[in-house]
Image: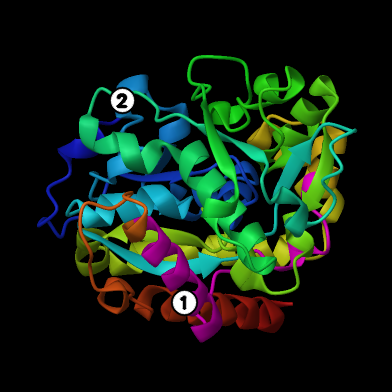
């Protein structure tokens, strides 16, 4: 496998490989890769498509710091925001919103059925993870950040604040079988009666909840306004290194166009999307079907709409206030709409050419 750091970011020559990374959730990037469309698009150019998830473990840190010039990342905002605050030369080129079973799990006898019922209760707060690179700790402690943001949204909906619950620090889940990234390590504590509520999200959390006999006390996805559901993946940013935009714009446009094509495919192929998501999320049929619902497969297309940008600013401000970020930065200056606009045009031209050839 090629060394991703062998590329000179100021070199305008053709790349030998394009790297991408995504989180274990529904993404158009992951679909395009699993369908083989990204590989096919660049085969004639002699460019390989490489994913951080399949790379040697030593390269996994780049999912956090984005320190590869030829890398495209479609993943959670906590890592992207933290990296930017630490000086990563990235731009946000798209945002998506996929509700993915954000819930508060409780014991069956908890009497927690609505947001107001959390008042005075004990909520599991995952500990910080350990990282070899200290700067990665806060941004990659996503279980902690997601829990704080998820619980805050629920409490705000009920007219309450974080001061109205008692947080009980639990294990980080790192290095255990507690689920992807230990996002629901607090389920052990819930079962033992040490906490009353645990925030979880995603397909594999569905399976974990069943193993522990936990039930849904509050379905965050059902809260009426999206501002209460803002979190690590809602909205989820697509980021790319500035050098990729400046030196290989045409390649980036073609990459994005194939992900848009995959989003088009997904809109009418729910069963096919479910099959791919089982491998992407490490979950079973029930986990995928429960976590991803309400026509999610029809909204995988990235945008930079005013609505999503406003919601993204909520997440950025939360990250700053709660110590995820080293420093503040200009969110508007971080956004670059030009690659996505060009990608939509590229795909439109591609579809029109197909019609003419038919």
Q: Position of residue 102 (x, y in %)?
A: 70, 50
Q: Position of residue 251 (x, y in %)?
A: 35, 62
Kindly check if marks 2 and 1 are in contact, taking CB atoms under 8 A apart as contact.
no
Magenta residues (range): 291-319
Looking at the image, is 99 positioned above or below residue 204? below
> Which of disc 1 and disc 2 is earlier in sequence?
2
Membership of 301 in magenta stretch? yes
Name the chief secondary structure element in magenta: helix
Looking at the image, is 322 positioned above or below residue 125? below
Q: Position of residue 222 (x, y in %)?
A: 79, 63
Quadrant of residue 89 in the image?
bottom left
Q: Position of residue 265 (x, y in %)?
A: 73, 62
Q: Secondary structure at mark 2?
A: loop
Q: Please give the residue where the numbered disc 1 appears in the rendered image.
A: 309
Name the residue at 48% across, 50% down: 76
Name the residue at 45% across, 29% down: 127
| 122 vs 231, nearest the viewer | 122
Relative placement, left or right, of 249 versus 157 is left
Quadrant of residue 260 in the image?
bottom right
| 107 vs 253, nearest the viewer | 107
In the image, farthest residue toward the front: 120
- C-alpha distance separating marks 2 and 1: 30 Å
Name the residue at 47% across, 45% down: 145
The quarter in which the C terminus is drawn is bottom right
Question: Across the whole image, how many numbered discs are drawn on residues?
Answer: 2
> From this viewpoint, is residue 70 visible?
no
Colour theme: rainbow
Residue 131's label in the rendered image is: 2
Name the residue at 33% across, 74% down: 335
């Amino acid at each position: 496998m090629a060394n991703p750091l062998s590329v000179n970011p100021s070199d305008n020559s053709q790349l030998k490989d394009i790297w991408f990374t995504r989180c274990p959730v529904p993404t158009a990037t992951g679909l395009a890769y699993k369908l083989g469309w990204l590989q096919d698009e660049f085969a004639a150019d002699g460019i390989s498509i490489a994913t951080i998830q399949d790379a040697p473990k030593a390269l996994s840190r780049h999912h956090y710091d984005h320190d590869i010039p030829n890398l495209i990342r479609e993943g959670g905002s906590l890592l992207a925001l933290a990296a930017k605050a630490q000086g990563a030369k990235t731009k946000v080129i798209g945002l998506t919103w996929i509700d993915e079973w954000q819930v508060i799990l409780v014991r069956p006898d908890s009497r927690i059925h609505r947001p107001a019922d959390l008042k005075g209760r004990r909520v599991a707060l995952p500990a910080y993870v350990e990282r070899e690179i200290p700067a990665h700790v806060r941004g990659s402690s996503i279980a902690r950040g997601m829990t704080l943001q998820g619980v805050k949204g629920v409490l705000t909906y009920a007219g309450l604040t974080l001061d109205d619950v008692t947080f009980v620090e639990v294990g980080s889940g790192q290095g255990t079988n507690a689920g992807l990234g230990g996002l629901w390590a607090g389920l052990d504590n819930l079962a033992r009666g040490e906490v009353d509520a645990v925030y979880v999200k995603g397909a594999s959390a569905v399976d974990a909840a069943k193993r522990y006999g936990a039930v849904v006390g509050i379905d965050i996805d059902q809260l009426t306004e999206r501002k209460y559901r803002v979190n690590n993946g809602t909205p989820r940013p697509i980021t790319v290194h500035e050098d990729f935009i400046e030196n290989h714009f045409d390649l980036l446009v073609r990459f994005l166009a194939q992900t848009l094509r995959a989003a088009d495919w997904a809109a009418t192929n729910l069963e096919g999307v479910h099959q791919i998501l089982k491998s992407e999320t490490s979950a079973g049929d029930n986990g995928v079907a429960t976590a991803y619902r309400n026509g999610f497969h029809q909204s995988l297309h990235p945008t930079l709409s005013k609505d999503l940008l406003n919601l993204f600013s909520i997440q950025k401000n939360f990250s700053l206030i709660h110590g995820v970020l080293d420093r503040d930065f200009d969110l508007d200056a971080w956004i670059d709409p030009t690659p996505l606009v060009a990608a939509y045009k590229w795909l439109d031209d591609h579809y029109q050419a197909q019609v003419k050839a038919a």
